[in-house]
Structure formats: C-alpha cells, structure tokens
Image (cartoon, rainbow, N blue to C red):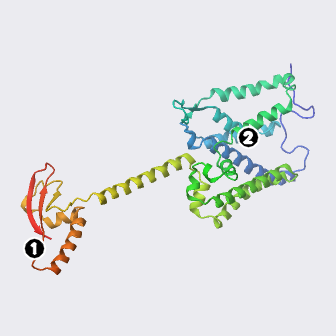
C-alpha cells in the first residue's frame, strides 16, 4: 500500500515560495513575527505552570531544550504542510494533576497533604502513541458524538482551575467575609483592591477572547504582548507591596508558610518579653545574685561590680527601687538607706565575689 499526501496537487514537501511572487516572502515576516511571539508565550507559560515549585518536581525544568524541540518540529511541520506542534496547556496541566500523590487521611476532617508528583515517561509515551494509532481508528472514532468530546474538554478545563489564584479571587465576589478562606493576599491587601485587580484581569481575558473569535484574530499575539503594558499601568493603582502579594511568581502555599513562621517568631519574642516583665529578677530582698558565665584567667577580686550589674538585665528593677529610696532620702535624711548584698557566682554556682552596697 503506497502512502500519498492528503492532496494530489502537492507532494510531501512544500515549497516556501510556491506560486506566489517573491515579495510575499518579505511581507510574511510581519505575521511570522506575531506567530513567533504567540508560540513562544504559549510554550513558556505552559512550562512555567507545569514546573512551578509547589508541584515539588525533582527533575530539572529544561525550558531551553523544550523550546528547541518545538522550534525544530515547527520547521519540519511547515515544510511538510502539517499542523504545527505547539504546547497544549490544558492537557499538560491535567496530566500533572493526574499524577499527584496525597497522603491518606487517618483522622476525620483531616485534610490530605500533598506529597509530590510521580515523575515518569510512561504516561507521556503512551498518550502520544495512542494519538498516533488514532490515525488507523478513524472509522470507529467518527461515531463518537461531538457533545461527548466537548464534555471531555470542558471537564479537563474545569478540573485544571483548582489552585489558580484568578479563579479563587472570582469566588470571593459572592462569598461572605466569615466564609472567606485564609488566603495570604487577604492579610495584606484590602478586599476592594483585590476585586479591582480581578476585574482588570477579567476584562483583559474577555477582550482577548473577543479578538480571537473575530476576524481580527491575526492581531491576537500583539494583544497578548500589550498585556505587559497593562501590567505596568497597574503600578499607578496599586503599591509594589500589594502587587507582590497579588501577582507574584512565588507559590501561594510557600508565601503563607513563611508568613506564618514570621508571625510565630514575633509572638514568641513578645511572650518572652512579657514573661521577663512579669518576673523581675530582683524581688525586693537585700541579696542580688549576678550570674557570671566564666572567670577563667581572671582574679575574682578584680571583678568590677558596677560593670557586671550594668551588663545584667536586672538593673532596671534595681534602679526603680533606687528612685524610691532617693525620695526617702530627701524627706528624711536621718533615715538609713537600704543596702543590697551582691553575690557574684560562676557557672558552677560557687560564690566568687561578696560585696555590700547602698542604694
């Protein structure tokens, strides 16, 4: 059986010029540039979504290798008159979601914990093998109703919306404040500004969809590039800190963990300060013990009591009592001022300096 091209008027290879005049090669440079921008952004955006850090992939990304393979395949497909080989965003995201591994829930109400992705080449190889075999199954595939295919594509698109920040912000429009999830950007950005940012994104999405579905679809790549300037205009409506929470490459889960860790450290520091204030070292007795870490190489008789007391954290409580004593001294000069016995101890608890001073 001899294989033939799809049309009898052409061969296996397509001439770049064909029956067109020579100047069409120069005129095709402009739409070719638009297609290059579109294919580059489609490929790189898909690769960034698949290889984001929250997926916990262990193997390298290989952005340059993927782009090189796509460029070579585009050249081969163009010469042979075949459809272009480009990234399939929805298919790629659904493929990654299907390989996710989560922990088993032991306790009732416990949320499963994401463990990682099963990284292998078997599923990808089998997918494209079956796609190639579908050429010989056209007599059977033609009986599949189109609504069934549309339903499969709709399910793949909806299932890939989970975890996308835009979709989470859209759900906030009709959600009461008490039912809102603990999202990291809601801690630092006012809710009305979050809604404004979402409306801007939805407006850009609708404009792109209208252009793609109309006769002006040829300028679609330029409109995608124009989104860069729209993003720069948002700097006049939002602060850099707000945009860092609303539009950042760092995954939501990682930013939330770092923020929770900082809050916990701050609370622990405040709690320690409160405990120090509520439990002063000086309890009003006439014995003040000052711990000394080490006295190696030093004569205990050379220890300066004033310096050691100034270095300790108990001097504040002593100075407060000394202020009250000064008031007593001014009122009654004949009254004897209280004295404090100071014991300086080393790490072993042995007394190295014993002195007595007046406040």
Q: Split into 4 quadrants, where in the image is the N terminus?
A: top right
Element type at mark 1: loop
| Quarter occupied by residue 125 | top right
**Outermost residue, right direction?**
9
- Whether residue 80 appears in this view of the structure is yes
Between 319 and 128, the residue placed more toward the observer is 319
Q: SS of the residue at dot 2?
A: loop
User: Relative to residue 151, is residue 282 depicted above or below?
Assistant: below
Q: Residue at x 17, y 66 (%)?
A: 307
Which residue occupies the foreground of this view, 127 or 284?
A: 284
Indicate left or right for 342 with 89 as reference.
left
Of labels 2 and 1, earlier in sequence is: 2
Q: Is residue 110 above or below residue 198?
A: above
Q: Which residue is mark 1?
A: 336
In the displayed structure, does residue 64 sit left or right of residue 265?
A: right
**Which quadrant holds the C terminus?**
bottom left
Q: Position of residue 350 (x, y in %)?
A: 10, 51
Front-lying residue, 121 or 317: 317
Q: Position of residue 302 (x, y in %)?
A: 8, 63
Q: Is residue 87 visible?
A: no
Q: Residues within 10 Å of mark 2 (few under 14, many from 20)?
A: some
The number of numbered discs placed on residues in the rendered structure image is: 2
Q: To which residue does mark 2 refer?
A: 86
Q: Measured from the top left, where is residue 327 in percent x and y?
A: 20, 77
């Amino acid at each position: 059986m001899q294989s033939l091209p799809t049309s009898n008027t052409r061969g296996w290879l397509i001439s770049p010029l064909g029956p067109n005049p020579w100047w069409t090669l120069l005129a095709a440079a402009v739409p070719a540039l638009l297609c290059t921008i579109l294919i580059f952004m489609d490929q790189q955006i898909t690769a960034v979504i698949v290889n984001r850090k929250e997926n916990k992939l262990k193997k390298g990304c290989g952005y340059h290798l993927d782009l090189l393979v796509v460029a070579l395949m585009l050249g081969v497909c163009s010469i042979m008159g075949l459809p272009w080989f480009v990234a399939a965003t929805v298919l790629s995201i659904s493929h990654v979601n299907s390989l996710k591994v989560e922990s088993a829930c032991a306790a009732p109400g416990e949320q499963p914990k994401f463990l990682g992705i099963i990284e292998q080449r078997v599923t990808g190889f089998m997918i494209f093998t079956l796609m190639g075999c579908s050429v010989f199954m056209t007599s059977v595939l033609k009986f599949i109703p189109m609504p069934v295919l549309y339903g499969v594509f709709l399910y793949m698109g909806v299932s890939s919306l989970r975890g996308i920040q835009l979709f989470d912000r859209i759900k906030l429009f009709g959600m009461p404040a008490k039912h809102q999830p603990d999202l990291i950007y809601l801690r630092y950005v006012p809710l009305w500004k979050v809604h404004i940012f979402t409306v801007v994104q939805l407006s850009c999405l609708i404009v792109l969809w209208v252009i793609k579905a109309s006769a002006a679809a040829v300028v679609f790549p330029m409109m995608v590039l124009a989104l860069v300037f729209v993003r720069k205009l948002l700097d006049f409506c939002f602060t850099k800190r707000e945009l860092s929470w609303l539009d950042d490459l760092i995954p939501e889960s990682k930013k939330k963990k770092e923020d929770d860790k900082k809050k916990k450290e701050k609370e622990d520091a405040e709690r320690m300060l409160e405990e120090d204030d509520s439990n002063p070292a000086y309890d009003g007795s006439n014995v003040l013990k000052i711990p000394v870490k080490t006295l190696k190489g030093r004569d205990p008789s050379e220890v300066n009591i004033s310096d050691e007391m100034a270095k300790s954290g108990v001097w504040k409580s002593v100075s407060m009592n000394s202020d009250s004593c000064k008031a007593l001294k001014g009122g009654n000069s004949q009254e004897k001022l209280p004295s404090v016995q100071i014991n300086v101890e080393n790490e072993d608890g042995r007394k190295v300096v014993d002195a007595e001073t007046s406040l």
